[in-house]
Amino acid sequence: MITFDLECSNGHRFEGWFKDYHSFVEQKDGNLIRCPICNDSEVRQVISSVNMKLSHREKEEDKRPDYKRLAKEFIRYVNENFEDVGPNFTKEALKMHYGVTKKRNIMGSATEKEERILKKEGIRYLKIPYPKIDPSDDSQ
């Protein structure tokens, strides 16, 4: 079982439970996932908050997540696993969507107009503020 935080096009957030990611995609593509508040079927996955299970022996002040470390790990992962296509993000996403190029993990930038084009074409993307920091630098 996997749990996703979801959001409808009206901004209502809710949780969905699925057998696996493939099951989520099938149900979403079939418009079977609906907002429990407004019944909207245009839903998207949103970033979930982090949950950490700690042993009972740890002190109360040690239970807080180290958000700076988590952010650096996230940035390191993206840098190592995504190709930065810069302002060509929309062009590359469209080429992958229509089978012109092989699908791969990409990151880059898009204007508001380009974001509307991606949405109209049915291309899912995740918009994440991405700070320019060195993930290997422990002094930040």
Image (spheres, grey):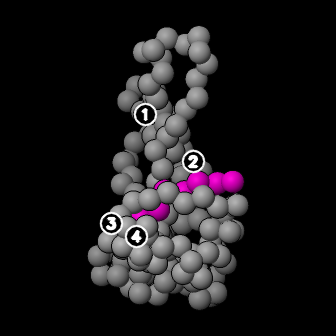
Q: Which residues are magenta?
A: 1-8
Bin the neighbour count of mark 1 within 10 Å (Cα to Cα): few under 14, some 14-19, many 20 and up: few
Q: Foreground: 63 or 93?
A: 63
Amino acid type, callout 2: Tyr
Residue holding disc 4: 8
Q: Is residue 83 visible?
A: no
Measured Cα–Cα span from mark 4 to mark 2: 28 Å
Q: Tag 4's secondary structure?
A: strand
User: Mark 3 vs mark 1: which is more N-terminal?
Assistant: 3
Q: Foreground: 103 or 35?
A: 35
21 vs 52, left or right, is right
- From the image, state whether disc 2 or disc 1 is nearer to you: 1
Magenta span: helix, strand or loop, mainly? strand
Residue 57 screen position, x and y as percent: 59, 11
Q: Is residue 18 visible?
A: yes
The residue at the point 59 percent across, 15 percent down is 56
Quadrant in the picture for residue 21:
bottom right
Measured Cα–Cα span from mark 1 to mark 4: 27 Å
29 vs 64, left or right, is right
Bin the neighbour count of mark 3 within 10 Å (Cα to Cα): few under 14, some 14-19, many 20 and up: few
Amino acid type, callout 1: Tyr
The residue at the point 49 percent across, 83 percent down is 122
Residue holding disc 3: 11
Residue holding disc 2: 77
